[in-house]
């Protein structure tokens, strides 16, 4: 009777475990899953993970950049290397929607820690963590792993678990590291002499061969005889340093006993940035810098035999300064837009009288850094939680109950110190040879201070759960039942609320047959009453074949497991034009003229029609995988997945007369599919007793397709413009065929553009719809998106006696980038010209060798249109990090201290087809490589 009670109870009582299973193998490897940990052999869902120690090998202030290429299934869009700027994109198994949120749910220590800011970037406390405080980063990819997250599991889940204490004597770990950053690529613009010559060439095309710059000017530019009236300024060189310093100092303590276990971390990270130091030039500025201070204290306390408390507290404080005042804003984009738009002969940095150079059209980039003040950002991030767990072994061994409260917050304060300054243009020389100046541009001012701007996000979560974990003969049962309430507030918006429950039941027979059912039941205020809650079930099975008698003692196949899963997940971030699309809104949008004065009077009108049946996106996920270990040295993993997303938000394709007075509502009618494979191979072995080595290769693919999105009906000859049937975010380009010749221009059968009259040397495009003219209807789907469809990672390393070495390569394939920076657009907007344009068209005789259209001084309406000419292969291979270390064992015998010294390189080189920039960062703050030295001592 007691045995029957145990079996029945195991189906009912479920919760989050804090320690090993009651009847499990204490030596079994544990892996993190949603709201839980699980014996690795019991896992039947698609999961991949990486240790925090591996992430520390990429020396970068942005932890998200360290994840690129390391987790099979996770695609990380490289973020800016500008200190303190986070603008990464994250996708798990590619993209599944063309309208809603595409990024995954990010969970730190069991609680959601992300939001989307006003600029549309994903913000997460993960970017402020240090690798030294992270135990592991785990990727949950299929429905079996993510269904428990309910309305937010469709895009996958990224779990971050920070380090905790251990039952061991105190361990002290101190690390110091200093590095130097250099740009990996810098755009190269032509000097003033070459600029003037090519300017004359472009000027002559439309002015009968006349020259804008005469021989005297050309000679002055060439010989540098007058650096003031004929300046030659490299604005990148004037505003940026060759190297930037980066440094890190960290100290952590770990240990504990049967009563208290603890992990404490103190860390400082500093980065000085590439902008020139100008504090000695003006008292209105402050040098670029970024400082971050991390503190963590995680404790596990056994209050009594059955009651335990688990305290999580992480704090990150950031201080970032960007010189340039109001023009600087949140990053250096304005500076880089300015310096890549200035010709080298615009004006000198300093005039002969030491005043700042400038013009009526342009201020001085270096003077902006020195005189316009600075923009300061200070952020405070808190990641905190308290969980109490009571063992209920008196009712049933292995049963426990838990309750938790978490508070996570992010506050960012802005302080803008700004001022104007005087700068002058040189107008020539007088009869005595003295330089003449214009009236001052700008006005000398003292600093104005504006501390009114801020950004704030808060998340408060309550969780309650029951857990059971036990074994009966050959039967293992793990079960979880939980409740969660989450209140998320961003700025002045009405709080976002998610409330619901989740459950998971895992049954293992004889440690070889695995069955698991999980579900999420969750509701949110985003939808209308009666439509707010969704049910998301999932199931998975596993078969450990190596435990069968016919393989159990096989010398080759040490481990072999098959697994499969299927289930439903949701995405409630729909990205419509209003938050509550079920509620009809009215606004002051239209009006009419009234009275003898013909004044325009605004009035209230019904805005976009509401849809009371609006709902979340639904994603049905299928996954099948195999895991194997051969000879005890070779680990293999393979997964195939197929996801089908429905109920994606779309606007109806039909048009209605304007006199109806309303816009059609959003409807849940869009559909996509996404499929791919993932494979990992790792081999590890040793040669003799001193040499150990490993090689790990990962590859994953994800290819999506829009099955239906509501689109306006197009003429039959324009059917190529439909997005349905193509990948999400598929680019559409005019197809460049070469250059127009005079014969083409004279031939009425050759299609011409509608936007301008072309000349020989202008780009020629294909008339895709055959209507005899070139217009936007001739755009056609070409290439891939910037998100790669294929990603590869190669991790290798060895240890030999006291030496250790590791290297990590990352590659991306099936990727296209678009060359849209000013570097590629010669003379446009009165700008400079770069080396990229040297292969320009000059005549029909040499047209076959031209790699660039004819030069033009006016803002070109034909040559710089979105076309395949500016489309570039975005594939790349990068050496993300390499490290060589040497350890001195027992260097302080009394303290049993080990010292390790190391040299590290991050982003040392890249192979790609993009000229002028890194293929992942075209324009703006340059991508950097970092070379560093460090030491680590452990007591």
Image: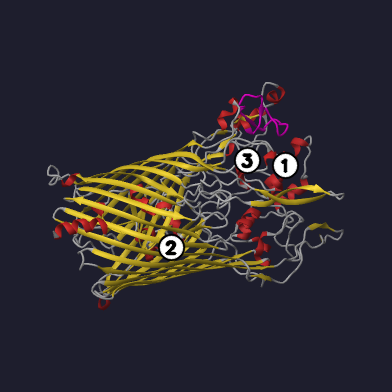
Say which label, 3 or 2, has the lower sequence index. 3
**Measured from the top left, where is residue 81 in percent x and y?**
51, 57
Q: Earlier in the sequence, mark 1 or mark 3?
A: 3
Seen in the picture, residue 657 relative to 316 is either above or below; the reply is above
Residue 484 location in percent, x, y? Answer: 39, 61
Indicate the position of residue 518 as horizontal and vertical percent values.
32, 51
* Label whose residue precedes the other's in the sequence (2 or 1): 1
Label ID, residue 857:
1
Locate residue 259 relative to residue 883 in the image: left or right.
left
Mark 2, residue position: 932
**CB under 8 Å between callouts 3 and 2?**
no
- Element carrying mark 3: loop
Q: Quadrant of the C terminus?
A: bottom left
Is residue 691 rendered to the left or right of residue 678? left
For residue 410: magenta? no
Q: Which residues are magenta?
A: 752-776
Secondary structure beneath disc 2?
strand
Q: In the picture, residue 1 is in which quadrant?
A: bottom left
Q: CA distance from mark 3 to mark 2?
A: 37 Å
Q: Are marks 2 and 1 in contact (CB under 8 Å)?
A: no
Residue placed most toward the observer, 237 or 307: 307
Residue bearing mark 3: 838
Q: Main secondary structure of the magenta part?
A: loop
For this view, does 467 lie left or right of residue 111?
A: left
When the figure is inspected, residue 824 is found, relative to residue 726, above or below; the finding is: below
């Amino acid at each position: 009777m007691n045995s029957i009670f145990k079996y029945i109870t195991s189906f009912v009582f479920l919760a989050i475990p804090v320690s090993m299973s009651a009847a499990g193998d204490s030596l079994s490897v544990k892996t993190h899953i949603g709201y839980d940990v699980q014996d690795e052999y019991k896992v039947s869902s698609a999961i991949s993970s990486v240790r925090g120690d591996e992430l520390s090998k990429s020396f970068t202030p942005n932890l998200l950049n360290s994840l690129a290429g390391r987790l099979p299934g996770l695609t990380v869009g490289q973020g800016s290397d500008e200190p303190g700027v986070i603008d990464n994109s994250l996708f798990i198994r590619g993209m599944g929607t063309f309208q809603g949120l595409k990024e995954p749910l990010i969970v730190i220590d069991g609680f959601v820690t992300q939001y989307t800011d006003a600029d549309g970037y994903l913000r997460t406390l993960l970017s402020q963590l240090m690798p030294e405080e992270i135990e592991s980063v785990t990727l949950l990819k299929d429905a079996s792993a993510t269904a428990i997250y309910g309305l937010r599991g469709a895009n996958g889940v990224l779990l971050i678990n920070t380090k905790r204490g251990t039952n061991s004597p105190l361990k002290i770990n101190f690390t110091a590291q200093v590095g130097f950053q250099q740009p990996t690529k810098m755009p190269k613009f032509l000097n003033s002499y070459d600029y003037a010559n090519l300017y004359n060439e472009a000027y002559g095309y439309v002015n009968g061969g006349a020259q804008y710059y005469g021989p005297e000017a050309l000679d002055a530019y060439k010989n540098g005889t007058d650096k003031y009236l004929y300046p030659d300024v490299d604005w990148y060189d004037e505003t940026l340093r060759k190297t930037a310093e980066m440094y890190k100092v960290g100290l952590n303590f770990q240990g504990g006993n049967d009563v208290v276990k603890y992990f404490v971390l103190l860390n400082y990270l500093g980065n000085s940035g590439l902008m020139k130091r100008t504090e000695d030039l003006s008292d209105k500025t402050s040098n670029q810098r970024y400082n971050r201070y991390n503190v963590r204290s995680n404790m596990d306390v056994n209050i009594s035999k059955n009651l335990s408390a688990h305290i999580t507290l992480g704090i990150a404080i950031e201080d970032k300064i960007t010189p340039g005042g109001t023009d600087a804003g949140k990053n250096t984009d304005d500076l880089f837009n300015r310096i890549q738009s200035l010709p080298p002969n615009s004006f000198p940095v300093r005039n002969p009288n030491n005043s700042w150079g400038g013009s009526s059209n342009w201020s001085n980039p270096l003077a902006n850094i020195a005189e316009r003040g600075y923009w300061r950002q200070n952020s405070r991030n808190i990641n905190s939680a308290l969980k109490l767990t009571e063992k209920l072994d008196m009712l049933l061994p292995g049963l426990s109950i838990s309750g938790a409260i978490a508070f996570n917050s992010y506050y960012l304060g802005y302080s803008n110190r700004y001022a104007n300054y005087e700068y002058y243009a040189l107008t020539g020389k007088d009869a005595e040879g003295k330089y003449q100046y214009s009236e001052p541009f700008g006005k000398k001012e003292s600093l104005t201070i504006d501390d009114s701007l801020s950004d704030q996000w808060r998340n408060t979560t309550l969780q309650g759960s029951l857990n059971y974990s036990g074994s009966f003969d050959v039967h293992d049962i793990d079960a979880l039942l939980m409740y969660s309430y989450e209140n998320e507030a961003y700025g002045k918006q009405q709080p976002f609320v998610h409330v619901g429950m989740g459950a998971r039941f895992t049954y293992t027979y004889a440690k070889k047959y695995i069955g698991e059912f999980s579900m999420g039941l969750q509701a949110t205020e985003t939808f209308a009453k009666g439509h707010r809650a969704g049910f998301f079930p999932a199931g998975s099975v596993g078969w450990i074949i190596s435990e069968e008698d016919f393989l159990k003692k096989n010398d080759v196949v040490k481990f072999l497991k098959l697994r499969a899963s299927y289930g439903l997940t949701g995405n409630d971030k729909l990205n419509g034009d209003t938050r509550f699309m079920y509620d009809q809104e009215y606004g002051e949008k239209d009006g009419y003229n009234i009275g003898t004065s013909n004044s325009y009077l605004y009035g209230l009108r019904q805005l976009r029609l509401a849809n009371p049946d609006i709902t979340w996106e639904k994603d049905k996920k299928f996954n099948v995988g195999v895991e194997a270990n051969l000879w005890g040295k070779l680990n293999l993993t393979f997964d195939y997945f197929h996801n089908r997303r429905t109920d994606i938000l779309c606007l109806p394709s039909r048009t209605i007369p304007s006199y109806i007075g309303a816009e059609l509502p959003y409807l849940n009618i869009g559909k996509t599919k996404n499929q791919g494979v993932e494979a990992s191979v790792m081999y590890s072995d040793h040669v003799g007793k001193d040499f150990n080595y490993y090689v790990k290769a990962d590859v994953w693919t994800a290819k999506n397709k829009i099955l239906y999105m509501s689109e306006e009906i197009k003429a039959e000859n324009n059917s190529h413009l439909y997005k349905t049937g193509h990948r999400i975010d598929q680019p559409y380009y005019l197809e460049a065929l070469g250059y127009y010749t005079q014969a083409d221009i004279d031939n009425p059968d050759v299609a011409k553009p509608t936007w301008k009259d072309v000349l020989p040397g202008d780009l020629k495009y294909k008339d895709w719809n055959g209507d005899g003219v070139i217009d936007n209807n001739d755009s056609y789907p070409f290439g891939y998106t910037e998100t790669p469809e294929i990603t590869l990672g190669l991790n290798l390393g060895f240890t030999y006696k006291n030496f250790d070495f590791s290297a990590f390569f990352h590659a991306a394939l099936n990727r296209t980038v678009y060359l849209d920076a000013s570097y590629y657009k010669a003379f446009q907007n009165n700008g400079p010209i770069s080396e990229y344009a040297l292969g320009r068209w000059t005549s029909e005789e040499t047209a076959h060798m031209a790699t660039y259209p004819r030069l033009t001084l006016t803002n070109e309406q034909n040559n710089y249109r979105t076309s395949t000419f500016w489309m570039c292969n975005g594939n790349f291979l990068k050496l993300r990090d390499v490290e060589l270390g040497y350890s001195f064992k027992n260097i302080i015998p009394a303290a049993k201290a080990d010292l390790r010294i190391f040299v590290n390189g991050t982003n040392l080189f890249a192979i790609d087809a993009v000229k002028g920039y890194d293929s992942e960062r075209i324009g703006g703050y340059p991508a950097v490589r970092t070379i560093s030295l460090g030491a680590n001592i452990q007591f």
